[in-house]
Image: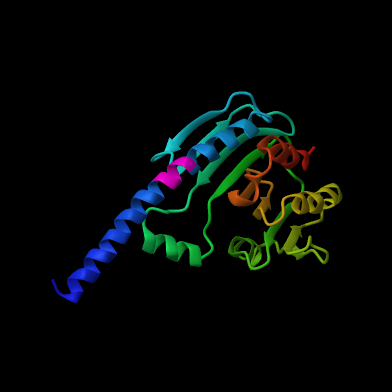
Amino acid sequence: MDTGQVIIYIVTGILVIWYIGGMIINRNRGLQVYRWLRSGLRQIGEQVDSQFIGSSSSAGRMVIQKAKMPLRQVEVFYLLETRELLPLWLVNWLMGKRDEFIFKATLSTAPANDLEVGLKGNREYRKATNGAEPAFQEAPEAPPGYQMAYRPHPDARLAERLPEFLERYPLAVQHLSLQAKEPHLIVRVHLENVLRVPSEAFFKDLSGLFR
């Protein structure tokens, strides 16, 4: 057996072991995230319809058709890193992709002003605000580490509550978009930064922004 064959066997063995380990980690992680989200979402709506997308180790979707005020309808997707495939996981890690969930909500009353909030350098924030018509106005005093823009006018009540929420869950919210069209609210959240706290508290605070 030459050196090339030995290297191939070693690399193959590493990839197989990594795949099995990643699959087990993601399966346990998926069930943890599923239970965490479902428990918290019951605070804003008793009937939570849920399903896995593909399998519990990759993604899931939850829907509340009749949410409590100030929300009317809620849809949540969670997406886990592709830990099973080492090369793909490394590429995604370098690109900053992590376990996350996306919270989409239709409010009981459509907001009068649009708002975009994102961590500094967030691509979704730049895409939403750059070249938009009508133009967004950059907020001069955004929460630490964040960028914030609005149109046509800032919401004084939300501007007061939002910094406290973002500071309570540091670096959890990657991007928040509030708009007049449905769904009114879209929030992208890194799961690692919120799984340590009770989900009931997180979703109560999130919905409380719009009361």
Where, by quadrant of the figure, is residue 175 drawn? Answer: bottom right
> In this picture, which residue range is highlighted in magenta?
24-28
- Residue nearer the viewer, 97 or 24: 24
Whether residue 15 is visible to the viewer of this picture, yes or no, is yes
- Residue nearer the viewer, 9 or 125: 9
Expressed as whole percent of the image width and height from the top left, the position of residue 111 reads 74, 44
Residue at (74, 61) in percent of width and height: 149
Examine the structure image and report whether residue 120 is included in the region drawn in magenta: no
Where, by quadrant of the figure, is residue 16 drawn? Answer: bottom left
Expressed as whole percent of the image width and height from the top left, the position of residue 134 reads 70, 61
Q: Name the residue at the front extreme.
A: 1
- Residue nearer the viewer, 140 or 111: 140
Whether residue 189 is visible to the viewer of this picture, yes or no, is no
Q: Name the residue at the bottom extreme.
A: 3
**201 horizontally vs 75: left or right:** right
Where, by quadrant of the figure, is residue 185 drawn? Answer: top right
Quadrant of image for the N terminus? bottom left
Expressed as whole percent of the image width and height from the top left, the position of residue 156 reads 86, 51
Examine the structure image and report whether residue 25 is included in the region drawn in magenta: yes
**23 horizontally vs 200: left or right:** left
Q: Name the residue at the top extreme.
A: 46
Residue at (50, 31) in percent of width and height: 50
Prevailing secondary structure of the magenta residues: helix
